[in-house]
Amino acid sequence: MPLRFTLRQLEYFVAVGEAGSIAKASEQVNVSPPSISASIAQLEAEFGIELFVRKHSHGLSLTAGGRVFLKEAQRLLSDADALHDVAGDISDKVRGPLSIGCLTTFAQLVLPSLRRSFENQHPDVRIRQFERNQGQLLEMLLRGEIDAALTYDLEVSQDIAFEPLMQLPAYVMLPEGHRLGGRDVVMPEELCEEPMILLDLPHSREYFLSAFRDKGLRPNIAERTSDIAMMRSMVANGFGYGVANMRPLNTLSPDGKPLVFIPMGGDLRPLIMGVALPNAEHRTQAMDAFVKHCRNFVGEQGVIRK
């Protein structure tokens, strides 16, 4: 007797299995919780197994059978996505799913506008986005959890291809009225006595600190944060200076206070923003279209200052 289930039901089941709750899965797939609950119940009835243990205070947890079922459902959905890719290549049409990661330090400046313009041009492509730090993005690429990542050329291994988009030098971020705010350039030596608000993210922090370490200097780290918006607000409110490579067109902090961006002198190399992808002989039509769109977007849009 043929099985009566849909890929959509499997998608909802996988979303719940990965998220650990129907509420979180509902946000991810943009479907109401009752619809997801009904789909899971239909799968359980169809296959005659219990997929989840219901815990009122702790959400859902997979049963032993549910964990096995989850792996097979993930594989089946991956195979179904591959069919979309093949169909797109055969028809020469840009379609199918894309999972795109973006570095947290500039995701809010770049990703929404870039994604909107790409999806307007290619409505048959479905994008899922992830904002992560550099280490997490590289791991997700190597594990095949995302198709590409908008990020910097920091610690990119030989297993990952990197398509450069834009060169971004380092800037010193200062509050308005700071004694160094009128300079054309600020050297690391001039900052050693100033309190520093360090953007404390894997790979990023080592890059920023190398501006001092390579000169035998030690910065005065007053605060650390993994949130660039918090760093901007801390700087704007006079708690110290920051160092960043992304200089937005709007130089106000999140709480509305003005910031000053001065080029950083010394030997700190500019970072290259680009698209990181797994090394592969073949790329889908959707992936090629996304990389091309990124190149055009960076060249035409005014979301950041070079």
Image: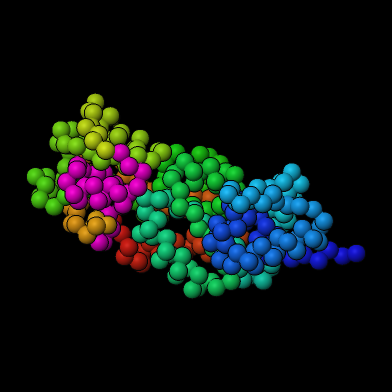
Q: Position of residue 254 (x, y in %)?
A: 27, 57
**Residue 243 within the magenta-colored segment of the rendering:** yes
47 or 207, which lies in front? 47
Q: Residue at x 56, y 41 (%)?
A: 159
Q: Position of residue 114 (x, y in %)?
A: 43, 64
Q: Is residue 159 above or below residue 54?
A: above
- Looking at the image, the residue that sits furthest to the front is 56
Residue extent of the magenta highlight = 224-250
Magenta stretch: includes residue 18: no
Camera-side residue of 150 and 233: 233
User: Foreground: 28 or 78?
Assistant: 28
Instruction: Work out which residue is located at the far right of the displayed protein and give it.
Output: 1
Q: In this rendering, would 182 be left or right of 71? A: left
| Direction from residue 193 to residue 208 in the image, left or right | right
Q: Is residue 177 above or below residue 117?
A: above
Residue drawn at 66 percent across, 62 percent down = 37
Instruction: Report the quarter where the C terminus lies.
Output: bottom left
Residue sitting nearer the eye, 136 or 124:
136
Residue drawn 70% across the image and 60% down it: 40
On screen, residue 3 versus residue 207, left or right, reads right
Q: Is residue 104 visible?
A: yes
